[in-house]
Image: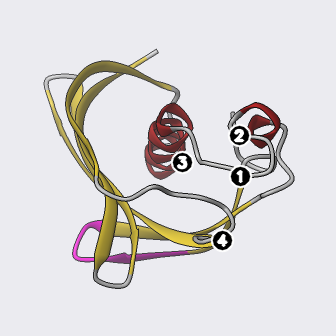
Amino acid sequence: MLVTDYYKVEKVTCTDGVYTYLISLNKECAVYEGHFPGSPVSPGVCNIQMIKECAEEILGKSLFMNNLQLCRLTTLITPISHPQVEVKVTIAEADGIYKLKGSIGMADETYLDLKAELIEK
């Protein structure tokens, strides 16, 4: 789990089935010591994990990402230029498969777009 070290959830809202997490990125996290010293960049895999952890919180279940259908990184996310981000998540379940749509951004700008299928661990 990356929560509390890599990021902190400040606020959660839900409107029309879209969960929005206001998240603060921790520029002091050890991840940035190697990615990259003096010029921290948020690793894509950590951002994907952050979206998955939000989905797990919504469902109250431990999930496994079974199929990553789309992951589009459109903006370099850093804890310096983007100390707070919004993670948006929608989930639909069918036959034990959770279809997830997620994004990271702020206001009207999207930094990462994600579509995936998850299953319960």
- The answer to whether 119 is drawn above or below residue 77 in the figure is above
| Amino acid identity at mark 2 | Phe
CA gap, disc 1 and disc 3 = 31 Å
Q: Earlier in the sequence, mark 1 or mark 4?
A: 1
The earlier-in-sequence mark between 1 and 3 is: 1
Seen at 42% across and 70% down, the residue is 20
Q: Mark 3 or 4, which is nearer the eye?
A: 4
Most foreground residue, 44 or 76: 76
Q: Picture coordinates of residue 92 (x, y %)?
A: 19, 45
- Split into 4 quadrants, where in the image is the N terminus? top right
Label 2 vs 4, first from the N-terminus: 2
Residue position for label 1? 39
Apparent side of residue 90 relative to residue 45 in the rendered image (left or right): left
Classed neighbour count for the residue bearing mark 3: other residues with Cα under 10 Å, few (<14), some (14–19), many (≥20): few
Residue at 82%, 37% in the rendered image: 33
| Front-most of residues 120 and 74 | 74
The span picked out in magenta is 12-18
Q: Label 4 near label 3: C-beta < 8 Å?
A: no
Near mark 1 (Cα within 10 A), the count class, few <14, some 14-19 or many ≥20, is: few
Q: Position of residue 101 (x, y in %)?
A: 23, 49
Number of the front mark, 2 or 4: 2
Q: Quadrant of residue 9?
A: bottom right
Q: CA distance from mark 3 to mark 4?
A: 22 Å
Q: Which residue is mark 3?
A: 57
Q: Residue at x 31, y 76 (%)?
A: 109
Amino acid type at image mark 4: Pro
Q: Is residue 61 magenta?
A: no
- Which amino acid is tagged 3? Glu
Q: For the point 45% across and 46% down, which residue is it?
A: 51
Residue 83 lies, in percent from the top left, at 66, 71
Q: Which residue is mark 4?
A: 83
Marked residue nearer the N-terminal end (2 or 3): 2
